[in-house]
Amino acid sequence: MRAGAGGGGAPRIFDNLAEQINFNEASSLLSYSRDFSTTDGAWSTPAAGLGTALDTKFVLAIAYDASSRFNNPAIYLNGSPVAVTTNTTPVGVVLAGSTAYSLGNRAAGDRAWNGLISDFYVFDSILTDREIAELADPSRVWADRTIWVPVSIASVTLCRPTSDILTTGWTASTGSDLYAMVDEAVANDSDYVISPLLSSPTPLTFGITPSAPAGTHTVRVRGQRTDTTGQVRVHLLDASNAVMGSSAWQALTATDTTYTLSITTSGAATRMQIEVAP
């Protein structure tokens, strides 16, 4: 968050002698630079872009491969990439910076950031768009080819962030009543997030990546009903939400039980739908 004008017209978010990002007050943009042996590289975000307003929280991320001077950095604001302008093309070889980062200023102490800085991370590899989006907004949740969908009559839980299913509005949880997964033989109960309530007749629908080809697929569910009666079934859908195949209804007992459901699809499925009913 930026509260006002900072030091020297270019207040630093961070600086490590060879790499820095500042807010250019004259142009109302964020500027990133990296030192090279002959000519330093400099890039900037659009003027008056997202994150430059006073008293507005924003999340900034930079992904840059400096191994080649021909590479340009990717700059993200609030998890989304923004247009990057090359102000100076680097020449030479990249120079190593200090491992000591100055946050909210530079080492000389004359470029103070007028505002608040909450968290600062440096990674030893370049993050993907999805990883950056998730850091900016943890409610964006991905799961990999193992598709976990814990379900009960009262609520639905989706676990395994950090991969391919994108569903918004989830918050952290420590467990659940039922999970489902496609074409996998082993499951565990860690890393859950919990959704708003899922009750009959409202289903939960989300994307799966990679798609499930036409054929027969196995979905494992484990759980127990939270009412006097309860049942669950799973549909595999195409991109337009047309049903490619469905499991039979599976009655849930009052004890924690694992069920194996079979779904035969007539075409490739890119979405999954979980449905519960009394």
Image (spheres, rainbow, N blue to C red):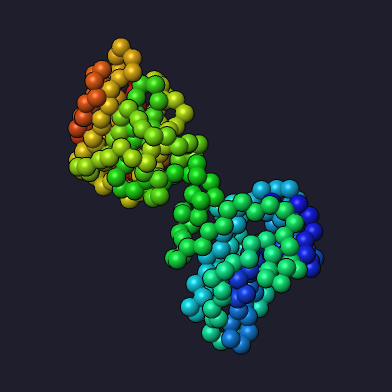
Instruction: Confirm whether residue 8 shows in the render.
Output: yes
Q: Residue at x 54, y 50 (%)?
A: 136
Along the viewing direction, whichever of 23 and 109 lies nearer the viewer = 109
Along the viewing direction, whichever of 84 and 95 lies nearer the viewer = 95
Q: Is residue 48 above or below residue 140?
A: below
**Residue 249's x, y, as percent?**
25, 24
Along the viewing direction, whichever of 175 and 245 lies nearer the viewer = 175
Q: Is residue 218 above or below residue 225?
A: below
**Residue 190's x, y, as percent?**
33, 40
For this orientation, the residue located farthest to the top is: 228
Q: Residue at x 26, y 47 (%)?
A: 213
Q: Is residue 252 above or below residue 96?
A: above
Instruction: Confirm whether residue 278 shows in the render.
Output: no
In the visual, does 215 lie left or right of 55?
A: left
Along the viewing direction, whichever of 54 and 95 lies nearer the viewer = 95
Q: Quadrant of residue 98?
A: bottom right
Q: Quadrant of residue 69?
A: bottom right
Tally of numbered discs: 0
Q: Is residue 220 above or below residue 108?
A: above
